[in-house]
Image (spheres, rainbow, N blue to C red):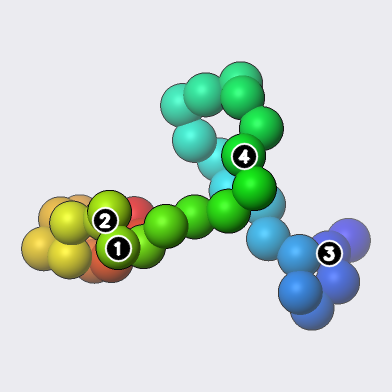
Amino acid sequence: MLSNNELILFHGTNQLFGGVNLEKSKNKRDFGKGF
């Protein structure tokens, strides 16, 4: 079970990373910014 501040992000990589930079996302794709 996740706490209120935990997030599981599934992505096509097996590398760990510290965060998500939404400035690099394309706002008009798929479901919007961050997807």
- Element type where label 2 sits in the image: loop
**Which comes sooner in the sequence, label 3 or label 4?**
3
- In this figure, which residue is indicated by the disc labeled 3? 2
- Element type where label 1 sits in the image: helix
- Give the residue at the far top of this rendering: 14
Q: Which amino acid does the dot numbered 2 rest on?
A: Ser
Q: Where is residue 7 in the image (x, y as percent from the top left)?
A: 68, 60
Is 31 placed left or right of 7 in the picture? Answer: left
- The numbered mark at residue 32 is none
Q: Which amino acid does the dot numbered 1 rest on?
A: Glu
- The numbered mark at residue 17 is 4
How many C-alpha atoms fall within 10 Å of the one at disc 1: few (<14), some, or many (≥20)?
Answer: few
Taking the spot 11% from the left edge, 63% from the top edge, the residue there is 28
3 or 2: mark nearer the eye? 2
Is 34 placed left or right of 32 in the picture? Answer: right
- In this figure, which residue is indicated by the disc labeled 2? 25
Q: Which amino acid does the dot numbered 4 rest on?
A: Phe
- Element type where label 3 sits in the image: loop
**Which comes sooner in the sequence, label 3 or label 1?**
3
Is 2 placed left or right of 28 in the picture? Answer: right
Taking the spot 18% from the left edge, 56% from the top edge, the residue there is 26
Measure the C-alpha gap from mark 4 to mark 1.
16 Å
Measure the C-alpha gap from mark 3 to mark 2.
25 Å
- Element type where label 4 sits in the image: loop
Measure the C-alpha gap from mark 3 to mark 1.
26 Å
Residue 35, quarter of the rendered image: bottom left
**Image marks 3 and 2: residues in contact by CB distance under 8 Å:** no
**Image marks 1 and 2: residues in contact by CB distance under 8 Å:** yes
- In this figure, which residue is indicated by the disc labeled 1? 23
**Which comes sooner in the sequence, label 4 or label 1?**
4
